[in-house]
Amino acid sequence: MSVAEEPLRRAVFLDRDGTLNVDPGYISDPKQIEVYLGVAAGLRRLSERGYLLVVITNQSGVSRGYYTHETVEALHQRIREILARRGAAIDAFYYCPHAPHEHCGCRKPGTELFERAARDHRIDLERSAVIGNMELDVEAGRRLGLLTAYVRSPGFYLEPDPGRGYGADIVAPNFLAACEAIVTRDPDGQRSTRSPRTPETKA
Ligand SMILES: [Zn+2]
């Protein structure tokens, strides 16, 4: 089977700071990476069900001059190492380095990084999901028609939403619970693909 004929994959798009790891604000040193308990177990659950795991993160600290692209790569390498020790793995990392005033399309809730990942990895967005701890994660997922999961964990300058989790499809107390809910909502982990749609058809 040629690459073009391979079925589209499902993915779970993952926010980074405050979702996978503690968010102290503008992490600039790999030593600051503290992956939440339960994250590796949740990622393993998703992998077992055939989901690709793709991190999409806003890193405006690059544009603000707080840290460099190389730092971001080192942080992601650190996350990979921690997860590997716990038997889990991320398939790809994408980040937006821009500040809000630059009005790029890749800063969440912009959807460009999700669309780029979908092209790079032949992802079926219709059967994919997003997990995040901020409204912009839920909003990006909504724009793309993803299953949206909101995790009630604090972010930098941000307490968890006391209400309905910004209207997310799933509102979970922690990451592992969000993963369990995604798997429960879509128990058929290896469903055959539907016909491709955007961004596949747009590319
Ligand atoms: Zn951007």
Image (cartoon, rainbow, N blue to C red):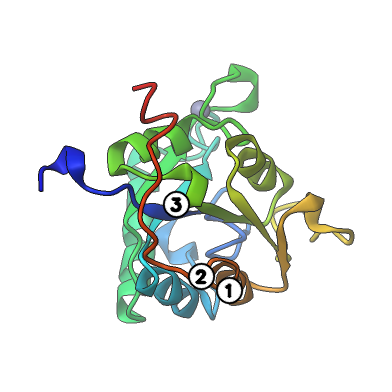
Mark 2 vs mark 3, foreground winner is 3
Q: Amino acid at mark 1?
A: Thr
Q: Is residue 51 visible?
A: yes
Of residues 74 and 169, the one nearer the viewer is 169
Image location (x, y in percent) of residue 126: 51, 45
Vertical side of 158 occupied by 183: above or below: below
Q: Amino acid at mark 2?
A: Glu
User: Alpha carbon of mark 2 to alpha carbon of mark 3: how far?
Assistant: 16 Å
Image location (x, y in percent) of residue 64: 55, 30
Q: Residue furthest left?
A: 1
Query: Which residue is under mark 3?
Result: 55
Of residues 111 and 36, the one nearer the viewer is 111
Q: Amino acid at mark 3?
A: Val
Left or right, 33 with respect to 75, comes to right
Residue 34 numbered tag: 2
Pick the quarter of the image with the C terminus.
top left
Label 1 close to label 2 by CB (< 8 Å): no
Question: Which quarter of the figure has residue 154?
Answer: bottom right
Of residues 191 and 19, the one nearer the viewer is 191
Query: Which residue is under mark 1?
Result: 184
**What residue sits 37% from the left and 45% below the top?**
123
**What residue sits 36% from the left and 30% below the top?**
200
**What residue sits 62% from the left and 72% below the top?**
181
First-in-chain label (1 vs 3): 3
Vertical side of 158 occupied by 181: above or below: below
Q: Residue furthest right?
A: 163
User: Alpha carbon of mark 1 to alpha carbon of mark 2: how far?
Assistant: 28 Å
First-in-chain label (1 vs 2): 2
